[in-house]
Image (cartoon, coloured by chain):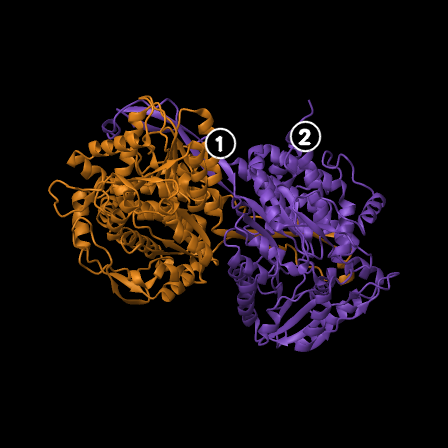
Chain colours: A purple, B orange
Amino acid sequence: MRPGPYERHRELLHHAVQAVAAGERCAPFTETTWRGAADAGMRSTRTAAKVFGSLLGRAFDLDQPGELGRVATETSPYGTAMGIGYPRCDPAVLLAAAGRATAGWRVAGLHHRTGLVLEMLRRLNTRSHELALAVHHTTGQPLPVAFRAAGPRAQDRALEAVAQAFAESERVPAGLRREETRRRGQPLPVCGTSTLVPRGVSLLIGCPDYPLWNGYPGLFTSLVTGNPVVVAPHPRSVLPLAITVRIAREVLAEAGQDPDVVTLAVAEPGERLHQRLATDPAVRIVDFTGSGRFADWLRQHACQAAVFATRTGLNTVIVDSTDDYRGLLGGLALALCRCSGTARTTPQNILVPASGFDTDEGAKSLREFGADLAEAVDRLLAHPARVARLVGALPGDEVRAALEEAGRYGSVVHASQPLSLPGRPVVDVRSPLVVRLGARHERVYTREWPGPVAFLVGTESTAHSLDLFRRTVGRHGALFAAVHSTDPLVLAAVETAALDAGVHLVENVADDLPADPSSAIADLPGAGAHFVTGRFRVLRSRHASAPAARESADALLDV
Amino acid sequence: MRPGPYERHRELLHHAVQAVAAGERCAPFTETTWRGAADAGMRSTRTAAKVFGSLLGRAFDLDQPGELGRVATETSPYGTAMGIGYPRCDPAVLLAAAGRATAGWRVAGLHHRTGLVLEMLRRLNTRSHELALAVHHTTGQPLPVAFRAAGPRAQDRALEAVAQAFAESERVPAGLRREETRRRGQPLPVCGTSTLVPRGVSLLIGCPDYPLWNGYPGLFTSLVTGNPVVVAPHPRSVLPLAITVRIAREVLAEAGQDPDVVTLAVAEPGERLHQRLATDPAVRIVDFTGSGRFADWLRQHACQAAVFATRTGLNTVIVDSTDDYRGLLGGLALALCRCSGTARTTPQNILVPASGFDTDEGAKSLREFGADLAEAVDRLLAHPARVARLVGALPGDEVRAALEEAGRYGSVVHASQPLSLPGRPVVDVRSPLVVRLGARHERVYTREWPGPVAFLVGTESTAHSLDLFRRTVGRHGALFAAVHSTDPLVLAAVETAALDAGVHLVENVADDLPADPSSAIADLPGAGAHFVTGRFRVLRSRHASAPAARESADALLDV
């Protein structure tokens, strides 16, 4: 007999569970030396390009219920005609189908579910290059960046989420502690079992920039804990999640499960599909990564659901002093340019005392700092090959509009300019816009600006920077914050402020991206356990282990 | 040097943590053989009565900020004049004080916080008889019941919550996995720490029936995980929580902590204080046990907070068949009478096929069953001493009104009648009201009725009972459900329905109270982990372990 999916992937799973428990790196998909994971072999880039090409200008079939027509919402910033027609399904029908699939998915049990999810990951791994092309062409990310955000690293991150979900679920004991009831002075044993009960239909709201990187943890954690998932991508980047959904449905169907455990929901942007789905009484879990404004909206309107929202918010850098001025400039320039300003670590607000700050090259005024930063950016972008590798294409019209608007609010320290990609004249690539502002223009820099827009905010002092940081990030959230200071007291104060504001902090690290981005699992809302345990509850069933003896209420009262 | 609170209670804590992890009973406060916990000795009932008496008719001082005046909202259903004037404090001032106390309580750290919380429990243990009197006189519960719900058993339950909160918090590793960033091809180690960050000010909304039993898990879990708590009792039962708050504040102040980590919020019932507090942006956690209606209100309006709501809802018994008809009758009669129908296991809706059901005494029609149940109730209440021990005083006017109203909606199977307590002629004690209804009167029996009101709902069949159960309990919640059936297929179907409806189930156990009520911790929302992990998040701070080498952005790009 062929082993089931759990048996086939047990070794991989236990490896991952142990690594997560020990706080160690677990990256079988990234580390090609690890067998098993990629046993079917990753398709070559050439095959992937062919497969990707074959998807363009066609209907993308998923065989989902409630199909009303087709919808094509994507345009490639690299000029490739997308024209992929996704099935536009009646949201009520999709939710009903997910609801019908719930009981079977619950009954499949933790082990079988986890096995199937690992099979999905294994197949996604073989399609890494194709997924990278899908991310590249819908987000504008340079291809190597897209491969990191959509390929083995994203799968390793998903595996970490799966291992965590599996381990947390296994911690729930199946049997209950032995209880007793007494009758006529005689103990009567009561046995019981506890059952992990999934919360219900889960909704993944896709983000436009990192649809897989940000989407996989919620998607796969929900699946492992027994919740069907309706995947609703951002209209600008549907394909990466559509391919993921298709693979998931194939795995489910082959295993005899209802494929509607995972469905894709797309619509024309004007239909407000995300809002429609998030507020449906049937949706019990919502995962979202994106603007603080929509996260707030979800908290206020999706009251029936557990909302796991990661706010992109106002990434902030506090500059107090440095003994590595060149390193600081280089790191900031890099962060500003990376992926047209959409990287997880791109700062929007750089808080600097208006009176300047101390460096290993002497005191620098705010004006000098701005000029030096602009120069660092220009130096970085001087090589077209590097631009191609680092910046990528501007993803959407609203970014162009933002670049125009933001410049009007202060002194332009570095103007956003068109850059050229070698051999691709039609692609719109831009350098970052850096605007110097007074701290009083809070309404400008507390907006979340898309793309490569950054503000150099002149504050009264580092203490004032800290106040601003605590208040603005505390209110609007952020994916990360950084501080540069040579003063241990300032570092301690910023650490406290970051805890108050509720944001991860990086200190005096010019290049803020760790070598192992899969550890970004720790950046998930609730950082681990809560991200899992909020998706199920535990119900108990108890019964007398012997048939109840016949007796009167009088006897029952002799407790 | 005197050992700190953590060292003093370490043994107790580790005993409890191990017991919880092993799924074993942990009841040091109940088991008097266990030393340490009750080392200061419980005050005698005589001393407790004296202390209780000394509280009556006076101001109850707490030395809280923002005091605006006094408020006295309690009346004892046993005729004792209460007249205790609690401080009425400005809610905004209380929340601001809790906010100010947050940083210090966070910085105190997990071990110190847990030590102080255990010291609170130890002192509460010495005051068990006094707390029982407070519960008895405000809820109407018979004194032995009040002692169980307010004394050592409630403390053991709280200890279980504390152990769980401690263990879940300790699972968060302090150090991060080692990361690297690379510069000029050289690895540069990045070190990091992760910090458990409490969510923020917690609000405990007290319930009128079991203020300590239901209140302690949320209160102490929030405190261990670092969140200050504003305790807002139900106006009808303030004293038990007020004594608890006073003891907590004493322990905090003695340890040099800000006593405003725990405060009491009371107001006149018309002031809608619970609503005011629950929707304040500063409140980040809400604990509530009570009606599904208010739980719904909280979910819709307290969007800024994590809401842990336990719905009392519609406790339901499904009767399909039995081989112990006398046991069934006796158990139901007992559950209906217990604590004037306010017990966790008092059924409101008893779903029975209108055509009757099979028993070991032959087929019984719905009418016969009603008559037999009424007789069982009367037999049970025939002895005044038993009434005193079992029923207690009717707690409030709205219960009297409910008893009058409910009788109008169907055939009265058992009328609620005044009962007499020996030697206490003024006390209002009532037998339960049982009303027979058709299943179509759903609007009547899907209301939550306070006090001893139960409906015998005639359904078309057991399948119909299951439909009703799934729908009504799924919508309104319940603390428990029970089924009586001799048919394994029916039991299996009810088990599935209970999972769908999201309620704990008891099968064929006539007396549904387990001998160890402290295991009721498993009945908490999320049953364990989620109840804890939803109260904090984990933030990371990373820094290069060597001073950043000075280098250009060009080098940084060689990643």
Q: Quadrant of residue A9?
A: top right
Q: Is residue B493 left or right of residue A455?
A: left
Residue B91: image location, x then y, percent: 36, 64
Residue A53: image location, x then y, percent: 83, 49
Q: Amino acid at mark 2?
A: Arg
Secondary structure at numbered mark 2? helix
Note whether B101 is above or below B518 in the view shown.
below
Along the line of sight, the residue nearer the viewer: A499 or B201: B201
Query: Which chain is home to disc 1?
Result: A
Q: Is residue B531 left or right of residue A486?
A: left
| Extreme residue toward the right, this view | A423
Secondary structure at numbered mark 1? loop
The residue wearing badge 2 is A8
Residue B553: image location, x then y, percent: 76, 62
Q: Is residue A511 left or right of residue B368?
A: right
The residue wearing badge 1 is A174
Note whether A467 is above or below B461 in the view shown.
below
| Extreme residue toward the left, this view | B423
Sequence order check: which comes first, mark 2 or mark 1?
A: 2
